[in-house]
Image (spheres, rainbow, N blue to C red):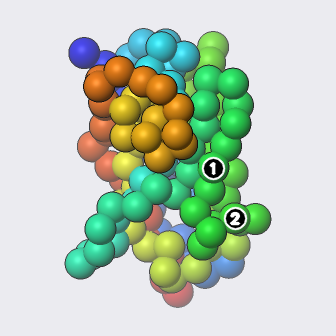
Amino acid sequence: QVQLVESGGGLVQPGGSRRLSCAASRSIFSISPMGWYRQAPGKQRELVAGITSGGRTKYADSVKGRFTISRDNAKNTVYLQMNSLKPEDTAVYYCNGGFTTARAMAVGHDLSDYWGQGTQVTVSS
């Protein structure tokens, strides 16, 4: 079993920046691809950004140019740098490793699928 722990959420003003971290209990290479998802109240969970073990990335159109996903294999950690934040970015952000992101990025993977508990990001003045 793999544990994913997100951190870095909080309250940020519009136009501000925030970096989320997702720390895995074992090698992220073994559970890649990794992705960040978000879910706002009354809305479905959506892919924000994904990254494969080879470094290929995918972004939701709504965050392109503002968010950057990256990984540090040595620290077993995936990051989401969020810049120019907007009120509509307010949501619970979840980290995923495995099948769900593999399907979103059209890469092969077994059925193992791991989720973190989520971290709240609120963009408000």
Which residue is situated farthest in the bottom direction here?
A: 125
Q: Could you tell me how far apart the alpha carbons at marks 2 and 1 are, in whole angstroms?
A: 9 Å
- Write the residue at 30% across / 23% down: 112
Which of pointers 2 and 1 indicates the residue nearer the eye? 1
Total tally of numbered discs in the picture: 2
Q: Residues within 10 Å of mark 2 (few under 14, many from 20)?
A: few
- Asked whether residue 15 is in view, the answer is yes
Please tell me which residue is depicted at 38% across the width and 49% down the height of the picture: 94
Residue at 51 percent of width and 82 percent of height: 87
User: What residue appears at the point 54 percent right and 16 percent down from the top-left corner?
Assistant: 29
Q: Which mark is residue 30?
A: none
Residue 68, image x, y percentages:
69, 51
Q: Earlier in the sequence, mark 2 or mark 1?
A: 1
Along the viewing direction, whichever of 94 and 113 lies nearer the viewer: 113
| Relative to 53, residue 27 above or below | above
SS for dot 1? strand
Residue nearer the viewer, 36 or 104? 104
List x then y, in percent, for residue 39: 34, 64
Q: Amino acid at mark 2?
A: Lys
Residue 120 in view in this figure: no
The amino acid type found where label 1 is placed reads Lys
Which quadrant would the N terminus be assigned to in this image? top left
Query: Which residue carries the number 2 mark?
Result: 64
Tell me which corner region of the image, top left, top right, bottom left or bottom right, holds residue 31. top left
Q: Residue furthest right?
A: 65
Residue at which label 1 appears: 58
Position in image of residue 33 (x %, y %) = 52, 30
Q: Is residue 85 above or below residue 81?
A: below
Q: Secondary structure at mark 2?
A: loop
